[in-house]
Amino acid sequence: MTRSSTPFLSNFEVQPSQVEPLLRTLRFANAMLDYAFYDVPAFRDALMKEGVDIVWKDSVQSDPAEQQQLPEQVNLTALANPEGAILIVDAKNSPHIRRFYNVEKFLDKKEGGVQLIDAISVSGVGSSALGSAALAWNASTALGRPVAAVVPGYGLADVVQQALGGWFGFEMYSYWLKQPVQAWLAQVVPGAARVGRHLLATTSDHATASGTGVPVFRRGSGSSDVLHAILKRSEHINLLMGHSKGALVIENAIVDLPVEQLKRLQVLTFGCVISELGNVGRYDQFLGSLDGLGMLNSGGNCPEHTVPDWHSTNRALPLTMPVSQLTGTVLTPATERPT
């Protein structure tokens, strides 16, 4: 290939500006699904009792840096943003939601948010900020203190994953398929493959594709890499909570942490049973007896607790998992108060 031919060929590459509208639309559709799978109605009702509503439709001005300056911190207009975020959700105190779009800023001991929390929740495949915040709200209600939520970035590899059944079956298969898919995209369409990887790119030691520099996953998903980076730099986080694919995110994030760090962890999962590492302090995994999707995605692993529920955590629907109540029943002394 001659040097002069490169600009011509680059005209045929899919550009980020062409991909972002599609991803935002799909992310918005996933927010609709969050109403079915997460406790969004209860989350909104609790805030409305304080005279606050959740603003979740994208505004014209969607720059994350400008959105973080909004006076009302429960504004979730970055809902459709495919780049991901870290939320700190506090059910007791205002501001109820704080947002971070940079892992290093979140980890900053002076200005970051990591010092405010000792628990992290991770929601399921494709979840938007709305579902992530609702799950963290359930956890914060049970704990009586703030909880961090990892809102996953959403890129082309995630679209392929969902097309193969990320929501409605074969979740573990599509989850493991996503890593080679995103590596291939990073080589073939590097510009478009960068979309949805901003949060991952703000971790200090993130991996990149050879030749293109596109951020790629080390642990099956960007969420696992982000969670691992947070845990590796934090000495006081002792509780991890995951629903559906969020449980798989946790499984991959902790696999190579130091033994001393694993011993202080309590891992709670809902709707997906993961393999248990021997050095982890405690597991409490909940699986519904009516949850066919959860059983399919658990790979034959057995839960500590079987409940008469299905996959959803939305208490407005019948026979759904009451995350706050279940969390309260299994708290250990180490997780009942900040350390």
Image (cartoon, rainbow, N blue to C red):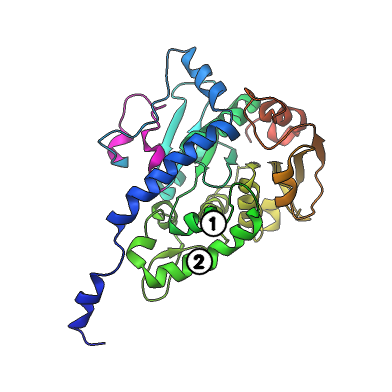
User: Circle 1 sits in a helix, a strand or a loop, which is it?
Assistant: helix
Residue at 36% over, 68% down: 189
* Residue contact at pointers 1 and 2, CB within 8 angstroms: yes
The three-letter code of the residue at mark 1 reads Gln
Residue at 44% over, 43% down: 27
What is the x, y in percent for residue 9? 25, 76
Residue at 25% over, 35% down: 60
> Can residue 25 be seen at all in this image of the molecule?
yes
Residue at numbered disc 1: 161
Query: Height in image: 218 above or below 303?
Result: below
Query: Height in image: 174 above or below 245?
Result: below
> Can residue 112 be seen at all in this image of the molecule?
no
The quarter of the image holding the C terminus is top right
* Magenta stretch, residue numbers: 65-83
Image quadrant assignment for residue 287: top right
What is the x, y in percent for residue 40? 54, 27
**Residue 181: mark:** 2
**Residue 36: mark:** none
The quarter of the image holding the N terminus is bottom left
**What whole-number distance in Å separates the C-alpha atoms at marks 1 and 2?**
9 Å
What is the x, y in percent for residue 30? 49, 41
The three-letter code of the residue at mark 2 reads Val
